[in-house]
Amino acid sequence: IDSRLQVPTCIGVFEYSLPGANRPSRHTTVKATCPTSGWSILMKAKVTQMIPTVIVTRSLGKGEVISRDDIDVQMREATLVTGSHFNSVDQVVGAKTRRYVSAQRRMSPKDVCVVCKGDFVTLTASSGGLSVNVSAEALGDGLIGDTIQVRNRSSSRVVKAKVGAIGRTEIKL
């Protein structure tokens, strides 16, 4: 509060609200109310939205399997986090790095693959209540939910499959 204003002392804790139907933006007006004295004042405020972001705690080389000890979640200012990012360690633990990733850097989907090119994976083909598992080779990199090509190791047939988990792909028949 501006020291030039003659504002009575507030005993207790201020209550803050957005006047009218305002939605918070980076620079906004906030109403501060003293519930014990019944007075209020409008003031300018800077709003910063913080979001969880997965950060690498140590440098990782290409092809390393990411463990829980290699990463951490830190709150970062949303305007400084550009592009795609991970917000939970569960999204990357067990994945492999596609390239060198330096310590204290934000981890992005471009840095990792859940199924990597050349990996041997389980391909599950399902229809209704029936499912068949076969061994396949990944012909591309992918994250959970991505569609990649895999080659059935016994028939050499190439199919498009959805990455379901680490080392697992699936197709619906």
Image (cartoon, grey):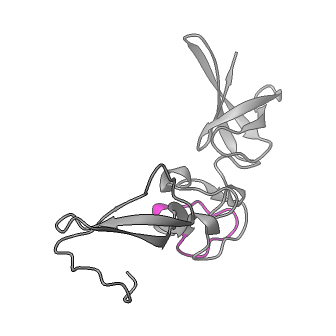
Q: Position of residue 96 (x, y in %)?
A: 64, 57
Front residue of this view, candidates 149 and 49? 49
When asked about the image quadrant of residue 164, the answer is: top right
Is residue 121 at least partly visible in the picture? yes
Front residue of this view, candidates 105 and 172? 105
* Apparent side of residue 123 relative to residue 35 in the rendered image (left or right): right
* Apparent side of residue 97 relative to residue 5 in the rendered image (left or right): right
Q: Is residue 142 above or below residue 136?
A: below
Q: Position of residue 100 (x, y in %)?
A: 70, 71
Q: Position of residue 95 (x, y in %)?
A: 60, 54
Q: Residue at x 51, y 53 (%)?
A: 23
Q: Is residue 26 above or below residue 123?
A: below
Q: Position of residue 27 (x, y in %)?
A: 56, 68
Front residue of this view, candidates 155 and 130? 130
Q: Residue at x 36, y 84 (%)?
A: 5
* Image quarter hosting the N terminus: bottom left
Q: Residue furthest front?
A: 6
Q: Is residue 57 magenta?
A: yes
Front residue of this view, candidates 100 and 122? 100
Magenta extent? 56-68
* Image quarter hosting the C terminus: top right
Q: Residue at x 38, y 89 (%)?
A: 4
Q: Residue furthest right?
A: 157
Q: Magenta span: helix, strand or loop, mainly?
A: loop
Q: Is residue 11 above or below residue 81?
A: below
